[in-house]
Amino acid sequence: MRHLMNPMDFSVEELDRLFDLAADIEKNPEKYAHKCTGKKLATCFYEPSTRTRLSFETAMLNLGGSVIGFSDAGSSSASKGESVSDTIRVISCFADICAMRHPKEGAPMVAASHSTIPVINAGDGGHQHPTQTLTDLLTIRSLKGRLDNFTIGICGDLKFGRTVHSLVNALSRYSGIRFVFISPEELRIPGYLREKLWDNALTFEEVIRLEDVMGKLDLLYMTRVQRERFFNEEDYVRLKDFYILNKDKMALAKPDCLILHPLPRVNEISVEVDKDPRAVYFKQVQYGVYVRMALILTLLDLA
Amino acid sequence: MLNVGKIEEGFVLDHIPAGKSMSIYYHLGLDKLDCTVAIIKNAKSNVMGKKDIIKVECDINTLDMDVLAVIDHTITVNVIKDAVIVEKKQLTLPLEITGIMKCHNPRCITSIEQELPHIFYLADADRELYRCRYCDEKNTERF
């Protein structure tokens, strides 16, 4: 039995198979419409997350399965003081697979070690969010046709953004990737990630102005500055609107430069950019459903 | 010059950095043993200037090598039988260690589920860096 805790849990070859399956699901959804008939997904969400939870639930419903679960800790037995390990033992009796989100880092790993059903980490605090990374990789592979040999700009909160750290780690396994990190001084990538890139002799540069590098990017991954990651409200207010991608900046980009964003977007991408065919962040949401469908099938050995 | 006699059977931990012996004594659980334990502090050393030494007269298997390696893998472990050194054990950093270090990350699941064992894995042997198995926070505890 396998779980998914970290995007690096799967080898590059396993990811290729997963993405091939997701691509086939996209082309032939009817072929998969009853693959999970009689199977149940439990969504155990200890903190609110409409988008990820609904994406998981849609994925299971698209496969013909059903869904049980809770969407905040208050409506679960956690409010009575039940431990994660006890909860998952109970859930294991009800469902065939579980997607868990928890504000504490490592909670899904604790669940996995006591579970008799596959557990998917659907986000644990600021730590990991592997299905977002799988979504990002599938979007790039589907729309660019490859996962190697491109220049990707990653812009915004590179210090606290877990999606950024996971994406950088995941892309580091492919050849010919050049990273351009665009952030204010205070939100640069953490030291350990920089050291890892140095150790693996990967090409990267760090800049402050988005305009200076826009023209050389094949992909631009925008991120939101998250209020909940700051202890100091003043810092958040100062940095939240540091980058705003608008029409003028898009005019500097290559004609085939794709714009991605894990969403929700606040101010960092102006709504006028939404009409640009290079803005693919809403398509990304659709790929999130395909990749979660492929993941559920893979972990349930139904692929 | 203070003299501590030879032991017949047991082990001698040599080349302990001066001042570290009491920490090792407690972390290895030597305080719970019923056998003879000698702690020598600030002994003269040609290489180190000053060093600590611990002599324990009991079965070598009571020694948790992993714990000792995490505390300081440069310590020399001499195994004694019939009052002579029969083996010098090399300490290697364990790939995973439980219950020695504590994760201090307030966002880690171990901060709210008290019964969970604190497990760390070796993330970088060159830098002797351990990270929490749950949250990947690096260990900052020194022994």
Image (spheres, rainbow, N blue to C red):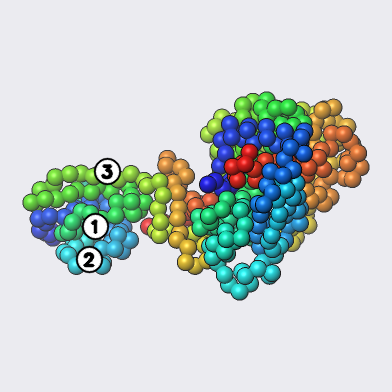
Write down the residue under mark 3. B90
Q: Residue at x 88, y 45 (%)?
A: A270
Question: Cβ–Cβ below 8 Å for labels 1 and 2?
Answer: yes
Q: Which mark is residue B62?
A: 1
Tag 3 near tag 1, CB within 8 Å: no
Q: Secondary structure at mark 1?
A: helix
Which residue shows up at 74% across the image and 43% down it? A33
Residue at the extreme left = B82
Q: Is residue B12 visible?
A: yes
Q: Which residue is mark 2?
A: B33
**Which residue, as the protein is rendered here, is positioned at the far bottom?**
A80
**Residue B58: x, y in percent?**
17, 59
Label 2 crowd (10 A; few <14 / some 14-19 / many >=20): few
The first of marks 1 and 2 along the sequence is 2
Q: Is residue B48 left or right of residue A204?
A: left
SS assignment at label 3: loop
Tell me the kind of residue under disc 3. Answer: Gln
